[in-house]
Amino acid sequence: MSTATRTTPLFSRNLRKQYPIAVRGEGCWIIDAEGRRYLDASGQAAVVSIGHGVQEIGLAMAEQSGRIAFAHTTQFHSEPAEKLADRVLAIAPKNFRSGGRVYFTSGGSEATETAIKLARQYFLEVKQPSRYRVLARKQSYHGSTLGAMSLSGNVARRAPYAPLIPEWGHVAPCFCYHCPFGKTFPECNLACADDLDSFLNANDASTVAAFLFEPVVGATLGAAPAADGYTARIADICRKHGILLIADEVMTGMGRTGKPFASEHWDLEPDIILTGKGIASGYAPLGAVIVAPRLVEAFEKGSATFMHGFTYQAHPVATAAGNAVFDYLDKHQLFAHVTPAGETLRKALAGLESHRHVGQVRGLGLLQGVEFVKDKATREPFPKEAGIAEKIRQAALEKNVLLYPGQGCVDGLRGDHVLLAPPFIIKPEECALIAESLHYAIEKVFSA
Ligand SMILES: Cc1ncc(COP(=O)(O)O)c(C=O)c1O
């Protein structure tokens, strides 16, 4: 039956929408059941790093599954999980390398949940039981489970669940294009970082366990990197108040921005790093919480037991996929490919910037965003109801290019962008196709 007329038994993301069936992937391309080919310019939400359809990943997973697919972590560890943890620690910022540990989850939201509980329990272990709140920033996204949602500052994604989620505190984002203080870098002297200090001074810092942030804000701000000096300032503020610093690198980790972890662009050494998405490039559901040695030591000297767990944590087949992806990244030196490929993409997009409704093209490596504004001089956004980002997505789809649209970068509601996060193997001619589809979409949407 054609996908256009079929009734799905799935509880879809949008019950009014018909979804094509993806049947095959080849590099940067996805092919549906009707044979239509789509260029995956967003890596399916910044997940796919090595490309689609790499046979050896499935073979490695089958091999592991044939040997042993599952053993519960209360009773066993597995070889692929131990091996992958070693490899992740070896590319993590230096402070993790001797004595750090990795807690594998089945995705980013579980990683955020784990970090919240780890931070809380750490302070129980070091006999500071008043500390439990985890602060985050406005206009951020950290996952869809309720703990992760309570940290997420993404207004639209939080709204329906407001009665269910605690508010521990959200401070200003670091977003120079729409500075929340109306200031300009560097004269601002990083007022956004100091907002964390002011918040802690005004809101009983002795109850705060951690501050969690995205070094490059992905889905919510459309690839907005921290300003230089920001991460060092917040690290100082966290140290001063005795709270943990957690970098959410679910989207930016595992090479996406041109370094293994985006924290490394600023030599940041957080206490915990969350990662996900690219760690298994979509071949298996996998996330990770990377824990610094001093936290591990506190647990070792204390209860030694983390009161937390998932049946499928550190899953042997998922971590086998992670190792096979790692092998592929190593064999083809794909981390090193991200910065030049990002530059090629950026050059291809350069022509967009002169358009009267393209406010900014921004990002790091292969995490790039294009923001659309109503008025380029004032940076005023379009009204939310105009649905610009979604219209751009739909128009680009006419050219068979898949984009990741987002709204709310200005104030949580207004502000339209599309996120580009193609696989690391993207070719110059595919970058050109992405740019062409955006030119087409912009002409179509803004001349309508
Ligand atoms: C920065 C960040 N944190 C956490 C998450 C949640 O990850 P997942 O959707 O795998 O649960 C996401 C997902 O987009 C993310 O971008």
Image (cartoon, helix red, strand yellow):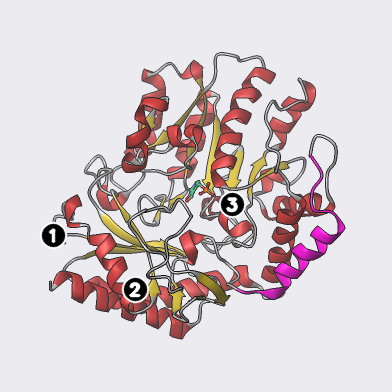
- Residue situated in front as seen by the camera: 247 or 98: 247
Which residue carries the number 2 mark?
397
Rendered location of residue 147, percent (x, y): 50, 32
Tell whether position 1 is magenta. Answer: no
Label 2: how many residues lie within 10 Å, few (<14), some (14-19) or many (20+)?
some
Which residue carries the number 1 mark?
375
Rendered location of residue 431, percent (x, y): 42, 79
Kindly state the secondary structure of the residue where label 1 is placed.
Answer: loop
Kindly state the secondary structure of the residue where label 2 is placed.
Answer: helix
Instruction: Check if mark 2's residue and mark 1's residue have beta carbons within 8 Å.
Output: no
What range is drawn magenta here? 53-72
Q: Quadrant of residue 310?
A: top right
Q: Is mark 3 within 8 Å of ligand 1?
A: yes
At horizontal 71% and vertical 28% (from top left) the residue drawn is: 306
Q: Quarter of the image for the C terminus: give it.
A: bottom left
| Label at residue 284 | none
Mark 3–mark 2 Cα distance, whole angstroms, equals 27 Å
- Residue furthest to the bottom in view is 429
At horizontal 46% and vertical 65% (from top left) the residue drawn is: 421
| In the rendered image, the vertical position of residue 229 relative to residue 394, given as above or below | above
